[in-house]
Image (cartoon, rainbow, N blue to C red):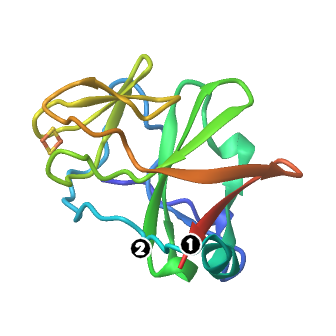
Amino acid sequence: MPEKDHSCNSNAREATKETLGLSRRNFFSGIAIAAGSLGLTTIASSAEAASKKYKVCATNAIKVGGGSIFKLSAAGGIQILITQPKSGVFRAFNPACTHQGFRLNSISGTNIICPIHRAQFDTTTGNVTRGPAQIPLQKYTLTVENKNLFVTLNS
Ligand code: FES
């Protein structure tokens, strides 16, 4: 059962942490979600104008070598997987497996693992480290400000 932590949900722009400790032997529920993109625009200025920054959580909410999935209610409920492969290094990905769209649910070493067909993705780059997936995880722009993590999404 995913653990709830509302410590990162103090205003409408912040995220709900759905799960904790994406780490060895600590699995998320196997909820399938549709793989999809955020809708690319062809004009850079339009994309910039439409992009919004959302606070995800404090940096100390992510364990070194682990990760967590957050639901951004203010962004239509989009889910964001945040990893911290090394101390102070944070990455943000779409947690939908690029094989068939199921939600990734665990980390082993430097790999994020899909529970369905066991594809693996690098926790730093999102690149495929084991098939059957062939496409890297979708990445999001993540910034650190005052010990908080913010993700920028295009609407
Ligand atoms: S859905 Fe993830 S490996 Fe098939």
Give whichever of discs 1 and 2 has the lower sequence position.
2
When the figure is inspected, residue 73 is found, relative to residue 107, above or below; the finding is below
Instruction: Name the quarter showing ligand 1.
Output: top left
Query: Where does residue 98 sit, x and y in percent of width and height?
Result: 24, 47
Residue, disc 2: 39
Query: Where does residue 144 sit, x and y in percent of width and height?
Result: 78, 48
When the figure is inspected, residue 107 is found, relative to residue 147, above or below; the finding is above
Taking the view exactly as shown, the residue that stands out farthest to the top is: 109
Mark 1, secondary structure of its residue: strand
The structure residue drawn at horizontal position 46% and vertical position 81%, both measured from the top left corner, is 76
Query: Where does residue 21 sit, x and y in percent of width and height?
Result: 48, 38
Q: Quadrant of residue 90?
A: top right
Query: Where does residue 104 sit, x and y in percent of width and height?
Result: 29, 44
The structure residue drawn at horizontal position 18% and vertical position 38%, both measured from the top left corner, is 115
Q: Quadrant of residue 49?
A: bottom right
Residue, disc 1: 154
Residue type of the residue flagged with mark 1: Asn
**Image check: 135 left or right of 38?**
left
- Residue 40 — which label? none
The structure residue drawn at horizontal position 47% and vertical position 29%, both measured from the top left corner, is 123
**Image check: 24 left or right of 92?**
left
Mark 2, secondary structure of its residue: loop
Local packing at callout 2 (Cα closer than 10 Å; few below 14, some 14-19, many 20+) is: few
21, 151: nearer the viewer: 151
Give the CA distance from mark 1 to mark 2: 8 Å
Residue type of the residue flagged with mark 2: Gly
